[in-house]
Amino acid sequence: MSCTATPQQVQGFGCAIAEYLSGHRGKLNGFHWRIEESCVQAAVRRKLLPCMSVEGGFAETMQLRQAVAERAREVQAQEQLPRRVEDLADLASFVISGWGNLKGSGEQTIRGFAERFTGIGVPFEHVRSAADLQAAVSPRKRRGLFSFSGIASWSKWLSFVWNDWALIYDARIAFALDAIHFMCKVDAPVFPVPVGRNPLLANFDAQSSAVFAWVARCIGANLSAFETRTQVVNAVAPKNEAYGYYLAVMVEAHRLLWPSLESRPLVHTEMLLFKLSIEDIADDFACEMLARLAPPAHPTGEPDQTCDTTSC
């Protein structure tokens, strides 16, 4: 079992996500992310939002993402170093600490994210993929560019600057991916889960569940304890490859999810997955866990009544 996903595994995982999400596409307009009042004030002060009446709905979130992307390009085009870095760091702080409400990243850490990803000489509009970004940074930064450390923070910054290809990778997204992996019996590496804050998801370990379910389907009956442990370790995608693997899987899911005549940005699939993570996906994951753990039938011989999950 390889911990690096093959193209076939990426396609299979993307197909499973698309099939699960297909019955929920109409819920995208119900996306909501609570924006703190201080963040709204900061957005208005920076002229990223037109007024103070903001509740974090789908349309408002898309508007804010686009406004940040445009402002980042204005800063890069008009300002010289080091002023450019300072203003991009300020914008990144607004996205990560303000909008994202991630207070654990200090000013220096956020400045580091701004320098690492957006301190490039290539115009932002010429960066159309993760590979383009990797090529645009200095050689000394390429090796650890998409390091898993701080991924919930720096992926927010990337997704606002390049909202056509970069997506947020946080605990809710990783949980949703691994829950679908478990429910749909996906044959592909499992996603590592960063530390999250949601109290519901703190009680669900979709990563371990998906790992053991996949290993159980893949290992032979005569493996030693050491060989079994090795299989378990190798079931999770390497952390330094997790972001690229995530983008590849989501591109495939997005391609299959929306009708060909609809021109929708990739971020719509991320937002739908995020919305469903602590709603339908958490419920379906819990039901599937109970169904697999429960005995097959009552002593009377009547089958157990378990809730249905979406078939992949």
Image (spheres, rainbow, N blue to C red):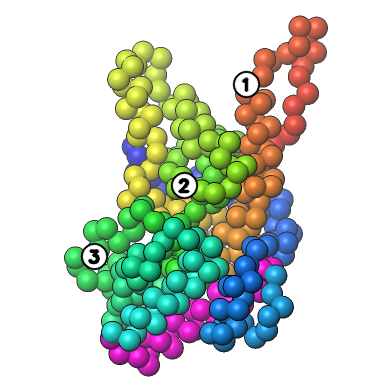
Pointers 2 and 1 in contact (CB under 8 A)?
Answer: no
Magenta run includes residue 71: yes
Residue 285 in the image: above or below residue 177: above
The residue that mark 1 highlights is 293
Name which quarter of the figure residue 111 lies in: bottom left
State the CA–CA distance, disc 3 to disc 1: 46 Å
Q: Identify the residue position indicated by label 2 in the image.
A: 195
Q: Residues within 10 Å of mark 2 (few under 14, many from 20)?
A: few
Task: Identify the residue at horizontal 58%, vertical 36% (top origin).
Answer: 203
> Residue drawn at (35%, 34%), measured in percent from left and top?
234
- Closer mark to the observer between disc 2 and disc 1: 2
Task: Give the number of callouts.
Answer: 3
Outermost residue to the top: 299
| Residue at x 55% of width, y 54% of height | 253
Q: Is residue 251 left or right of residue 261?
A: left
Name which residue type carries label 2.
Answer: Val
Tag 2 or tag 3, which sits nearer the N-term? 3
Tell me the tag on residue 141: 3
Q: Quadrant of residue 115?
A: bottom left
Say whether residue 254 is left or right of residue 120.
Answer: right
Mark 1, other Cα within 10 Å: few <14 / some 14–19 / many ≥20: few
**Dot 3 or dot 1, earlier in sequence:** 3
Give, as a single range, the part of the protein colored magenta.
56-81
The x and y percentages for residue 249 are 48, 52
Q: Quadrant where the N terminus lies?
A: top left
